[in-house]
Image (cartoon, helix red, strand yellow):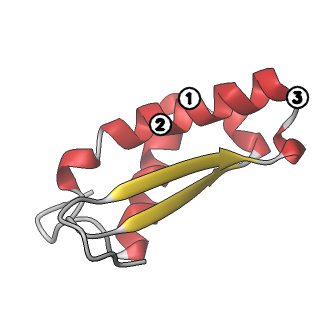
Amino acid sequence: MPNQEETSRFGITAGRSVGKAVQRNRAKRRLRAALQSYLSLVSPGWDVVLIARRPMLEAAFPKIQAATAMLLQRAGVLDETYEP
């Protein structure tokens, strides 16, 4: 959702379906790390919530990064200069 601020904000969550606390925290850490690569490319003025899912626990990190980029691009929050 667009916000009225000059920065973009991100919320990361993982439900109990991901696993116990250790698995949920690991999934959120991996998602945060993947998101770090794209923060400089995000347009200002967005509130974004990312939800970690169970397959993230076994996925290779480059696959998580690619999925994160695709979701951000599909949501329209990446700058127009971004090319996959």
In the rendered view, tell whether residue 84 sits above or below residue 35.
below
> Looking at the rendering, in which quadrant would you find the N terminus?
bottom left
Residue ID at (74%, 42%): 55
Q: Earlier in the sequence, mark 1 or mark 3?
A: 3
In the rendered view, tell whether residue 18 sits above or below residue 2.
above
Residue ID at (41%, 66%): 47
Count residues near mark 2 (Cα–Cα under 10 Å), then give few for <14, some for 14-19, many for 20+: some
Mark identifier at residue 29: 1
Residue ID at (88%, 46%): 17
Tell whether 50 sits left or right of 70: right
Residue ID for mark 2: 32
Position of residue 6 measured from the top left corner of the image (x, y, whole percent):
17, 65
Q: Quadrant of residue 37?
A: top left
Position of residue 11 measured from the top left corner of the image (x, y, whole percent):
52, 52
Q: Earlier in the sequence, mark 3 or mark 2?
A: 3
> Looking at the rendering, in which quadrant would you find the C terminus?
bottom left
> Does dot 3 land on a helix, a strand or a loop?
loop
Q: Residue furthest left?
A: 81
Count residues near mark 1 (Cα–Cα under 10 Å), then give few for <14, some for 14-19, many for 20+: some
Do the numbered discs 1 and 3 sit on residues whose CB atoms are within 8 Å? Answer: no
> Does dot 2 land on a helix, a strand or a loop?
helix
Tell whether 61 sits left or right of 6: right
Inspect the image, locate mark 1, and give the three-letter code of the amino acid beneath it.
Answer: Arg
Distance from Cα at disc 1 to Cα at disc 2 = 5 Å
Inspect the image, locate mark 3, and give the three-letter code of the amino acid beneath it.
Answer: Lys
In the rendered view, tell whether residue 17 sits above or below residue 7.
above
- The residue lying toward the viewer, choosing from 64 and 36, is 36
Tell whether 12 sits left or right of 4: right
Do the numbered discs 1 and 2 sit on residues whose CB atoms are within 8 Å? Answer: yes
Inspect the image, locate mark 2, and give the three-letter code of the amino acid beneath it.
Answer: Arg
Mark identifier at residue 20: 3
